[in-house]
Amino acid sequence: DAKTTQPPSMDCAEGRAANLPCNHSTISGNEYVYWYRQIHSQGPQYIIHGLKNNETNEMASLIITEDRKSSTLILPHATLRDTAVYYCIVRGTQGGSEKLVFGKGTKLTVNP
Amino acid sequence: NAGVTQTPKFQVLKTGQSMTLQCAQDMNHEYMSWYRQDPGMGLRLIHYSVGAGITDQGEVPNGYNVSRSTTEDFPLRLLSAAPSQTSVYFCASSSILAHEQFFGPGTRLTVL
């Protein structure tokens, strides 16, 4: 079973920040938080990951609470192409050898 | 660098037929895996491999066989297709020490 809880859907206006929440209250000390997205039935695409500290890359920012029980993915200036299902996943520290467990994710719709 | 490729893109089978879904990657990744995705659901892991000659079962392995004779290829075999195997199949690969998994474009399979 997925170890995360996400809202099933969210809307965002184009150009505004999209803040996608994720609860992972049972996360272990050695587990990372990963975010992937899936655009219109394409293969999932890696976005970002983090352990304790906040992370930022060219796609998004990841804010992890101090107790690590929840996190927020931030798309700073959402575009129509960001419409997708976003998956929040927790996983151990073994890199690629640890399997990803996908929940149902959050369907983000960016509106013009 | 083609990344992860999957063939065919679409396939229709009759119940009881067998077939092989092909997956190849050109990134020299040790880890490869197969997922299936049913409508409105997240991805579920079928089988995975951490290197040539090594395979293991995921969450939903029944009805599927895999082998890993080379680093590049990880075919998924359906021995006797059933309507319940109608799904979209994704292959993924990653370096054992890396955090990002790369997904193929998927194979859409219909079993009549």
Image (cartoon, rainbow, N blue to C red):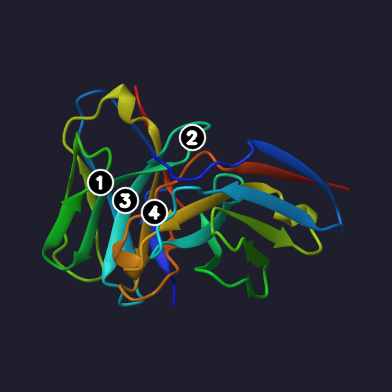
Q: Do the CB atoms of the residues marked 4 and 2 lie less than 8 Å apart?
A: no
Distance from disc 4 to disc 3, alpha carbons, whole Å, reads 11 Å
Q: Residue at x 62, y 42 (%)?
A: A106
Residue B29 occupies quadrant: bottom left
Of residues B104 and B56, the one nearer the viewer is B56
| Picture coordinates of residue B91, whole percent (x, y) | 36, 54
Residue A99 screen position, x and y as percent: 33, 55
Task: Provide the residue designation for mark 2.
Answer: B41
Q: Which amino acid, by three-letter code, is at mark 4?
A: Leu
Decide if residue B109 is in sight here.
no
Tag 2 or tag 1, which sits nearer the N-term? 2
CA distance for labels 4 and 2: 14 Å
- On the rendered image, what quadrant is the C terminus of chain B found in? top left
Tell me the crowding category of disc 3: few under 14, some 14 to 19, or many 20 or more residues within 10 angstroms, Cα based: many
- Please name the residue that numbered disc 1 is placed on: B58
Are discs 4 and 3 both within one chain?
Answer: no
- State the residue position of label 3: B34
Mark 3 or mark 1, earlier in chain: 3
